[in-house]
Every structure is written in C-alpha cells, then in structure tokens.
C-alpha cells in the first residue's frame, strides 16, 4: 500500500530532523534532550506503523509527511529565534502526538474507540433515567450535565481532546449515582417497609414497587459497569485524541 511508503518517508524525515537538533544553539541542553526524545519516539512509532498498515489512507499519510518536512525545515536557529522556543517545542510535541494517534487511522485500532464511545453513551442513558425517578433534586443535577455530556459525545466522535476531558469530567457523578442506585435498590428489595412506602407514593401495588426497585438496581449497575469500562478504555486510548 502507498501509505506504507509514505509513513516510512515520515520516519526518515524525522530521523533527518534529529540530526539537525544537535547543531542548534538557540535550544538549551535540556530542551535538546527533550526534543530528541520526542522525535525518537515519533520516528519509532511511524516506522512500526508502516509495517502494520491495514487501512490505506494516503491523504492522511501525506499530511503527516508535510508536517514532518515542515518541522525539519524549521529545525534551525533562525526559525527558533524568530518564532520562539515555545513554538518550536510545540511543533515537536505535535509530531509526537500524531505518531501516537496514527495507529487508530492506519492499523484498525479505531474499533477500540468505537467501543469506548458506545460504552460512554449507553452508560449515561441509565443515569438520566434514574435521576428522573429519584426526583427533582437529582433531575436538576442531570440537567446541568446535559450540555457537557452532549459536547463530550460530539467531540469524542471527532477524536477531539476536549471530548476526552469533558467525558472524564462528567462521568464521576453518574458513576456515584449508579452505586447509590444499586445500594438503594437492594435496600428496597430487602425492606418491605420501603416497598410499601414506594407503593403508597405511586398509588400502585407492592409488585409494581418491587419492579421499580429492580429497575433502579439494574439501571444503576448498567451505568456503573458501562461508565467504568468507558473510563478505562478512554484512558487507555487517550493518545488517539488530538
């Protein structure tokens, strides 16, 4: 596949860039070592990826090559003096991030992200259902989280770092709510007095109250398990988000 050859060119370009770093005088020794470490990792990632390509994406591969060539051309004292060390180090860090994200586009690892996204989506739904069951106070909390949840879902689908941050920000409350729902559901099922209270409040039979307690328990368990899995998968694959 053509992408394999282009990715090898990316790795070679980064290697050429590494050779130019040592001659820089506008970077401190500390920044030189940091730059070389990031470039070496990026070069190794792109070279390994070139041997494991299963999806031919020439457009994206050429994008990486252009960025690598640009970094190579900018690896000189004149550019660093003009644009600043911070801007140069930012471009080095970005090529490193690209190398970590690339396997999700070329090696078929995007399936892992899709599983994480679905776990997040289906883990949040029970939280909103349970919040409505428990009453106004919990419903208001759920309403507050609607906008960041929607933003997280949209950004996650586009593999944006904002979506990753928002998802980690909104998941703790639903997970705590899930644990609370499990605890309350078990308490209600093992306490006839609580079932009676639920039945009287709803004007329904004990059987209906028992069904509601079971539903709350199952929804809480689903939310806790799915969001726990989503948290693990999103953190594990955090490098896929740019």
Image: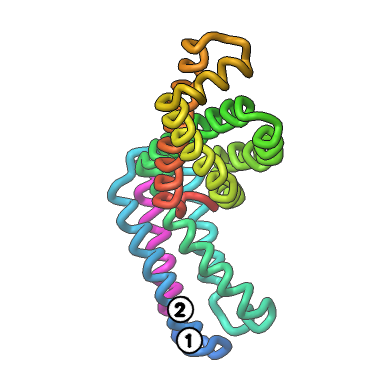
Residue at (54%, 90%) from the top-left corner?
Answer: 25
Q: In the structure shown, which secondary structural element does the residue marked by tag 1 occupy?
A: helix
Q: x, y (%) of residue 164?
A: 54, 49
Q: Left or right: where does residue 5 sit relative to residue 28?
A: left
Q: Quadrant of the N terminus?
A: top left
Contact flag, marks 1 and 2 (Cβ < 8 Å)? yes
| Viewer-closest of 142 and 147 | 142
**Rendering coords of residue 121 (x, y %):** 52, 32
Q: Quadrant of residue 174?
A: top right
In this rendering, the answer to whether 198 lies above or below 20 is above
Q: Residue at x 41, y 79 (%)?
A: 19
- CA neighbours of label 2 inside 10 A, class few (<14), some (14 to 19), many (20+): some
Residues 4 and 46: in front is 46
Residue topped by disc 1 = 30
Q: Which residues are magenta?
A: 1-19
Image point 43% across, 67% down: which residue? 14
- Crowding at label 1, few (<14), some or many (≥20) Cα neighbours within 10 Å? few
**Vertical placement of residue 82 versus 145, above or below:** below
From the image, tell me which residue sits under label 2: 34
Alpha carbon distance from label 1 to label 2: 6 Å
Residue 98 coordinates in the image, percent (x, y): 48, 56
């Amino acid at each position: 596949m053509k992408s394999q050859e282009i990715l090898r060119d990316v790795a070679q370009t980064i290697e050429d860039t590494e050779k130019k770093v040592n001659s820089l005088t506008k970077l401190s020794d500390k920044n030189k070592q940091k730059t070389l470490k990031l470039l070496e990792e990026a070069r190794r990632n792109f070279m390994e990826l070139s041997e494991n390509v299963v999806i031919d994406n020439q457009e994206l591969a050429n994008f990486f090559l252009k960025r690598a060539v640009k970094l190579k051309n900018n690896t000189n004292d004149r550019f660093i003096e003009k644009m600043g060390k911070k801007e140069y180090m930012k471009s080095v860090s970005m090529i490193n991030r690209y190398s970590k994200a690339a396997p999700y586009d070329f090696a078929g690892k995007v399936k892992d992200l899709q599983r994480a996204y679905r776990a997040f989506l289906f883990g949040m739904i029970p939280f909103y259902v349970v919040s409505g069951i428990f009453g106004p106070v919990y419903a208001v909390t759920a309403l507050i989280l609607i906008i960041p949840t929607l933003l997280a879902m949209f950004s996650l689908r586009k593999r944006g770092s904002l979506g990753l941050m928002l998802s980690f920000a909104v998941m703790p409350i639903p997970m705590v709510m899930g644990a609370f729902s499990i605890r309350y559901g078990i308490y209600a099922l093992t306490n006839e007095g609580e079932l009676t209270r639920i039945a009287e409040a709803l004007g329904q039979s004990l059987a209906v109250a028992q069904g509601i307690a079971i539903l709350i328990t199952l929804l809480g368990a689903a939310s806790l398990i799915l969001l726990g899995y989503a948290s693990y998968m999103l953190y594990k694959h955090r490098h896929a988000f740019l």
